[in-house]
Structure formats: structure tokens, C-alpha cells
Amino acid sequence: MKNNSYILLTFLFLSFAVNAQDKTVSPVDHVSTLVGTQSVHNLSNGNTYPAIARPWGMNFWSPQTGKMGDGWMYTYTAEKIRGFKQTHQPSPWINDYGQFSIMPVTGKIVYKEDERASWFSHKSEIAKPHYYSVYLADFDITTEITATERAAHFQITFPKNDQSSIVIDAFDKGSYIKIIPSENKIIGYTTKNSGGVPENFKNYFVLVFDKPFETKYTWNDKGLAKDQLEIKDDHSGAVVGFKTNKGEKVNVRVASSFISFEQAEQNLKAELKNMPFEKVVAESKNAWNTTLGKVKAEGGTDEQLNTFYSCLYRTVCFPQKLYELEASGKIVHYSPYNGKVLDGYMYGGTGFWDTFRALYPLLNLVYPSINKEMQQALINDYKEGGFLPEWSSPGLRDCMVGNNSASIVAEAYLKGLRGYDINTLYDALQHGANNEGPNATGRKGVEYYNTLGYVPYDVKINENAARTLEYAYDDFAIWKLAKALNRPATEIAQYEKRMMNYKNLFNPEFKLMSGRNKDGSFTKNFNPFKWGDAFTEGNSWHYSWSVFHDIQGLINLMGGEKAFTDKLDEVFSLPPTFDDSYYGGVIHEIREMQIMNMGQYAHGNQPIQHVIYLYNYAGQPWKTQYWSREVMNRLYKPTPDGYCGDEDNGQTSAWYVFSSMGFYPVCPASDEYVLGAPLFKKVTVSLENGKQIVIKADKNSAENKYVQEFKLNQKVYDKNYINHFDLQKGAELDFNMINAPNKNRGATKASYPYSYSK
């Protein structure tokens, strides 16, 4: 008996060991799409939603807890789900377009969003990029969703019921629905949007069910239309129903198109075919693992790995592919600029004010082929819209400041992307730099900027100092590209002169940037803690460092390296004082700075995110190492409240991805990354050219956060930066980590990163 028990226990142990080995944890297993969803208007912990999608997919899907039209479509603290929505929303502040929802119900037919809403629990919810599942308690229904780039597959498990139904809500502001019982099909379109679309905008959709309809109704805000299979109204919808047995699964395949019903059918046919649900899930999981697997992080805690891959997931969501493939394979798109169907690529859903800083540098390093498509799409943006977008969703949106499309275009070419019409894009940069366009395009205040060298404070142009500082960096990007394209010397010199315009805002009394009047005087009663006004969603303490291309020039203005580093130290040591008078109240960005216990360092908004790395320009790289680790440890978690502000289209996540690898693109249009200190013991980046970047930090730990010695390709390397093209050749980066700062390494000017004045 004892021997038999021993054999049985041994067998069970071996079986467990084999099964454990089979269950390899893949990158997507570390991702939670709920990270950042516990947000409200006055405090953002990410302002995300749990997207079911493919990387850069045209259509995302999300459970919807908010009411129709509410940008906060899913809030973690909500108790009920109203539907499952197709979405293209890049941010709750920008809101959505191309949206409609599906909601299964049982019993009495309910179709209005409040009446059909069901209680749910996160304990009965699985939220992954490739698969979502939730139990709808009021209806005893489990809904599962997976997606392709332009289609989705629902698998809905019903109880035994004589009236199980599925509600389709095409939303208000103009919609259309038609039920086709002979084909178990529903088609329709929605026009609901938040701007940035032509008058003929429609999102066409098609749904195919694997179960015949026993009941079928259309509806509008007046009620059900029992004998009407087609309806066009301000707010249209449909309900189809059938009897179900306990545990019966009903499959719904759905796709949409911005072009036509026929193209929606083509998208459905091409991407879903008749694949079973499980196969679509497996293919989606593989697509995510292929994309996320380009960066392999090892030697961290589960929390760190979950945070890393949840951040990496966010970096490959936006901008979305807005192009479609005809049956022949031809690439076409509906133009959000002129309403025509045209050839070629189209992307939308990103604000360059945010994403030029780290998101696009990450694309250029790890996913350059995708950015090449985006560059080709920018050519179409310019040809169809007259300007490059600064915020697109899907077309031009009037949001934020700057002319940072210049950085997006210049960086891609300067870092080696080829095979597209760079000359047309350069023309677009020239046009944007010298003209004011609609909806945040071009440069507001351009005539002042080009003549005075700054946008004045007293000419009724808001956020003027922020505009000036960003225009100066954008001019640097254009200057770099102009030189690479061998443009005329006078043209090159023009941008070289303008990129130094940042100096015109340096207020010597405060040794910070401030607004400046048209007559040359600085603004009276200057308060460096005042948010907004001359700056954008920040104050002078945040924006004074926005001289990405010439930190040495800024150091010189401040009075040398000691004065510069003392000022940097103050960012973290000052109390979180603020003046909100410009806004008339505390905006969420202010609150997020105030509660993080990092002084004036407002990581939750983008303008200051590079500042930690500036110690490398003044001989104190150990402070970069300290503060980057502090921010990674304290301000990022793989939880619903896991961000410290808006996770804007991957930018805040890209900061974490770069920082955890041990370097960051302070000046994207240069070819350098500024060193920090890695978070993991090992990270391997598989480049598209077949080479690898292997980052090693064997002694890394919570205590060992400082760099004693750094080796590049097994040779001691004393610079505070690494070169993009050296990494592209394949590289080994070895960080020897210790628990105390090495104040000698990287402390001489020969080690400092690029500055124009250097």
C-alpha cells in the first residue's frame, strides 16, 4: 500500500511538473488591459479602456459602462455594463467615432441602454488584448470577444430561455439598421462622431449570426418597430431573438468599414472567414505575442514584468490603421479630410504633442516597418488635408500646441527609414512651419515667431511660451532633415537660426522660461508655479527644460552646470505648490502632480518626462539613475490605478519601456539615446534587420540601482549616451549595478550627450 501511494504521488508530481512546463508564460499573458481604467474627470490613473484588438488595428472593442457618447466608456469602479462597443477612441477628452454596440439579454426585450444594463463583477471578468470575457449577472449570460484588425468574433453563452436576444445599438446623430433574416444578418451604419470628419462620414457594419432569428425588431427612441426590418433615424437599433438551451453558444461575427457595406463584407470574409472562435483567439494571441515578443524582459518581479508588458501593449495600440484591403489586395482608405475613397495608407488617433517624445522613437527602434506605413500615410494626410495633422481622430482635431509633426517626419528619416516620398513630407514641414492652419495644424502665431523670435504673451495667443519652445525644437528637427536632404544653404541657415529662439524666453531674474511681451519686456508678476497661461498643462518649472536639442545652451543660460543641477534638484525638492487661476479650478493634471509626493515633478503629463535624464548633460548621471528607478517603482503599477496621469496613446508607457531598458530619447531628432539604468537583469530587443540588442544587468536589484561601470560590446564605455545606429548593428549593453552612486563615471564633458551648443 505504501509503495502504491508513493508511485501515485510520484506520478502526480511528474504530471504537475510536465503541465507546468507546458504552460509557458508568453508576453501577452503579462498584460492586463484594465491598467489605467480606474479614472475620473478630476483624477486620471491612465484614462484607458480594456481594448480587445490587434496591434494598431482599425477597430477596437470594449465593454461599455458609460452612457452613449460618454468618453469614459469604461470605468473600473462602475457596476453595470450597457453593451460591448466598437470604438476608435484615442482618449476620453477627444472622444469617439465609428461606434456602435452589441448587448445580449434574456427574458423581456429591453433595448434602451439603462434598461439593458447588467451588473457584473471583475471577479468574473478576463481582460486581455486578444480575449475578453465577462459574466452578465442580470441575464445569466457569459460574453466572450476576440478580434482581428477590422472584425470581431463574439461567442455568447446563454441560459435555457424562450426569449434570448441580442441588441444592436447604432447610436444617435444619424444611424441606419436593416435585418436580413434569410442570411442571419444585420447591416447598418453609424455617423456618430466627435469631430474631424467630413459630412459624408459613415461607419458601415455587418453582423452575421450562426443561429436563425425567431424574433426580429428594429427600434428608435420612440419604441420597437415590430413589423419593420429596416429603419433610418436619429437613433436606430435592432433586436433579434431565439430560444436557447442551457449553455448554448451563439456566435456573432462582425466587421465594419469606413468605405461601404460591400467593403465591410469583404473585411469580414477576409479576416474571419468561418474560423471557430477558439482559432480566432489563438491567432490573435499569436499576433500579440509576435509584436510584444520583439522585446523580451527577464529577471524582474512578476509585478515589474506585468507592468512592462502592459505598457508595451499600450505602445502598439495607436495610431490605428484606417486603411482597408479590397478583394484584390489593393490598399485603400476613406479620407477623413475630403470624404473620398483613395489609394494608399491612412492612420489616425494620436496627438504628436504627446507621442513625438518617446512613442515614435520606440517605433523607429523596434517597429520601423509600421512607422514607414505611418510616414506614407502622412503624405496622404498632407495631400488630402493641406497640412500634416498634429492631433488626428480621425482627421484634424483642435487640440494641444506645437508643430511636432516636424519631429515625427524628421526622426524617421534621420534614423534610417526609406522607401517613401520624403521630399513631399519635407514640403509639408516647410508649409507647416511657415503658416497657421486649421485645428492646431501649422503654427499659431507664426508671423510673430518668425519676426520677433517668439510668440508674445500679450497678443491674445494662449500658451505662447509653450508654443515658442516647441517651435524651436521643431525647427531643429527641420534643420537636421534639411541638411540630410541637401537643401539650399539659405534655407538650412533659416531653421538653424530659428531653433535658437528658445533663448528669447529665458528670464534671467528667475533663471526659468517665462512669457514675453511684444515690446520685449517679460511679463509682470511672473509666477513660475502658475499652470497654463503662457504654458500648456504645466508651469514654468515643467516647461523650462523643453530645449531638447540644446541642453548645453540652457546650462549656459542658467549659469553653468552647478546652477543647472541645483535647479533640477529643486524640481523634486520644492513642495507641490500650484496656481490654478488660469483655469479657474484644479485640473486633473495639477491634482496628479500634487498627490505623487515628488515635488514639482509632474510625470503624469508629458512636458517634463525627459527631465530626469538631463543630469547626464551636467556630470551627475547617478541622479538620473536614482530618479528613473523611483518613478518606475512608485508611479507605475499593473493595476486599474496603475498610471499617474493620462496614458496618452502610448507615450507615458513608452517612457517606462525605454527607461526599464536603461536609456531614453531626450532629443528624438538626434541619433542618441541618453543613458539611465535598466530595471531588469536582462532585456533582449529583436530588431527587424535580424540583429539583437542584449541589455544585461546581472547584479540588478531593488538596492543595486546605480551604474558602477558600463560596457558596450564588451568594452568599457564612458559616455552618457548610446548611438541609434550602433544599436542597429546589434549590440550588447552590460550594466554593472551597485548600491551606491559612482560619481566619477560620466562626470566629464567628453561623456555628455549631444547639444547643439556643444
Image (cartoon, rainbow, N blue to C red):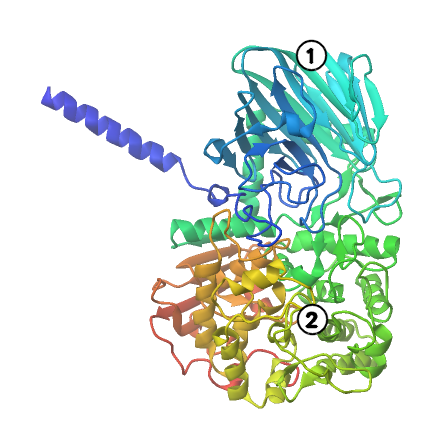
Q: Which residue is mark 1?
A: 212
Residue 677, percent from left and from top:
45, 67
Residue at image point 73% right, 37% down: 99
Quadrant for the C terminus, please. Answer: bottom right
> Which numbered disc, 1 or 2, marks the residue that appears first in the sequence?
1
Q: Residue at x 84, y 78 (%)?
A: 448
Q: What is the x, y in percent for residue 100?
A: 72, 33
| Residue placed under numbered mark 2 in the picture | 535
User: From what the image shows, is residue 33 above or below residue 450?
Assistant: above
- Expressed as whole percent of the image width and height from the top left, the position of residue 506 reads 68, 84
User: Which amino acid lies under the numbered mark 2 shown in the image of this protein?
Assistant: Phe
Q: Is residue 729 visible?
A: no
Q: CA distance from mark 1 to mark 2?
A: 59 Å
* Viewer-side label of 1, 2: 2
Q: Who is closer to the viewer here, 243 or 712?
A: 243
> Where is residue 736, by image quadrant?
bottom left
Specify whether residue 243 is in view. yes
Neighbour class for label 2 at 10 Å: few (<14), some, many (≥20)?
many
SS category of the residue bearing label 2: loop
Counting other residues with Cα less than 10 Å from the Cα at mark 1, is it few (<14), some (14-19), or many (20 or more)? some
Say whether residue 716 is left or right of residue 685.
left
Label 1: state its secondary structure: loop
Report the number of numbered marks. 2
Q: Is residue 187 above or below residue 585?
A: above
Q: Of residues 109 and 691, which is closer to you in this image?
A: 109
Question: Could you say which quadrant of the image residue 284 lies in?
Answer: top right
Residue at figure coordinates x 50%, y 83% from the top left: 566
Q: Amino acid at mark 1?
A: Pro
